[in-house]
Amino acid sequence: MTKTNLVGAGPEEIEAVVAELGEPRYRARQIYAGVYGRRRTSWDQFTELSKTLRARLAERCAIDYPALLRSFDSADGTRRYLFEVPPRERIESVFIPEQKRDTFCVSTQVGCAVECLFCVTGKIPMRRNLSAGEIVGQVLALQADRGTVSKRLNLVLMGMGEPLLNFDHVMKAIRILTDPDAFSISPRRITLSTAGVVPGIERLALEPVIPNLAISLNATTDEVRDTLIPINRKWNIATLLGACRNFPLERRRRITVEYVLIAGVNDTDEDASRLVKLLRGLRKKVNLIPLNADPWVPLRPPSEERVAAFRKILLDCRITAYVRRPRGNDISAACGMLAGRLTPPGSQEETPQAPESNRGGAERPEAAADGIPRP
Ligand code: SAH
Ligand code: SF4
């Protein structure tokens, strides 16, 4: 009999297991707190339970985190984790140390169906949604690796995949992550980033626990956004920003508007002025992300001066705008770079989601003389 993995189980599922074993209900709470709050991985650690019950639990239930294949350390302290999930798929998470906080970036899908032009994850065909267990399992595995549990932990759903296209599993994971008996991470410390799945934003607005919302806007005209983010043809800029304006925000909370700056595509002064107009009336902050270049992406980042000029136009209109410096670029861990790669960039072995093992993904494109890959 295959064992039920309790990583990803909600309180009611653990109650069902406990009921089947003929045990009182409060045992479920003990198990739930042990798995998530105390991060126990073996039934032997549940010393508050009788030996007989522990043995019966061990027969029926597992406490399994995603299998860590490798981790990669960047010169800037960032660590990229490569996990294998069934059936032999690869996903990634990133630990990003910052001055005032640590950030965990986790994946929500294997590959991504949205296929944004600028994103390496989007080059991997969508394989499947991750389960709630595989999402919280990444957090558990990272916490286990870091040893101590950071008090200033921020969690961002900005790894591989589009979280709002895996709505139910993502929301289940968020409920466990925020539950005081489990991870007890404040929803204010969790950010969900979407490429603009409007029905998902509308559903999120109705949830009892709502994380911070980030939208990847990345363009100021539908013409450009259509080419960068194909789902813009379904939910255009006006529809997306309309959903953001209706999104309930608690006091002092703001929507994060991510804007990947791409040379000659969306980085002009006119774009900056249009962005100011588009965002009028929205409580927001803007994160400008100079494109992370990659052989898989046929685009280039703007110069530092262009980035600064773009930001100044926003600041002059009293819009909070930060420039996000890439973290973990040397280990393919920066925004949009997650592709299940086994080796750091520049290495000869580099193969995003190795095709020979049927893990999805295409062959690495041949770089032409100008360094731009051709489809
Ligand atoms: N699918 C979600 C979350 C994951 S992507 C989304 O798109 O929002 C996280 C962020 O990385 C997004 O804001 C995306 O615009 C950005 N990104 C993707 N590719 C990038 C690249 N090559 N350089 C810089 N940022 C990139
Ligand atoms: Fe998917 Fe986000 Fe990458 Fe677009 S930017 S392909 S939505 S992961």
Image: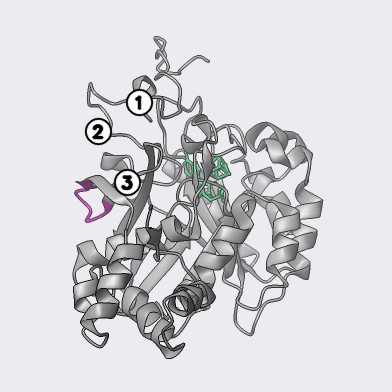
User: What numbered label is drawn on residue 354?
Assistant: 1
Q: Mark yes or no: residue 280 visible.
A: no
User: What numbered label is drawn on residue 229?
Assistant: none
Any magenta on residue 77?
yes
Secondary structure beneath dot 1 equals loop
Q: Is residue 113 left or right of residue 373?
A: right
Residue 275 to residue 171: above or below: above
Query: As shown in the figure, which amino acid type bears the numbered disc 2?
Result: Thr
User: Residue at left 81%, top 52%?
Assistant: 238
Task: State the residue position of label 3.
Answer: 83
Q: Is residue 251 left or right of residue 9?
A: right
Residue 346's quadrant in the figure?
top left
Marks 2 & 1, CB-CB < 8 Å contact: no
User: Residue at left 58%, top 65%?
Assistant: 171
Q: Identify the image's colour scheme: rainbow, by chain, secondary structure or one colour.
A: one colour
Whether the residue under disc 2 has CB within 8 Å of ligand 1:
no
Any magenta on residue 369?
no
User: Residue at left 26%, top 40%?
Assistant: 330
> Residue 276, image x and y in percent?
70, 58
Task: State the residue position of label 2.
Answer: 343
Residue 119 to residue 159: above or below: above
Q: How many other residues sit within 10 Å of disc 2, few (<14), some (14-19) or many (≥20)?
A: some
- Mark 3 vs 1, N-terminal side: 3
Residue 357's quadrant in the figure?
top left
Mark 3 and mark 1: Cα distance apart in space: 14 Å
Tell me the magenta residue range: 71-79
User: Residue at left 21%, top 80%?
Assistant: 51
- Mark 2 vs 1, N-terminal side: 2
- Judging depth in this view, the residue of 267 and 160 nearest the camera is 160
- Judging depth in this view, the residue of 167 and 284 nearest the camera is 167
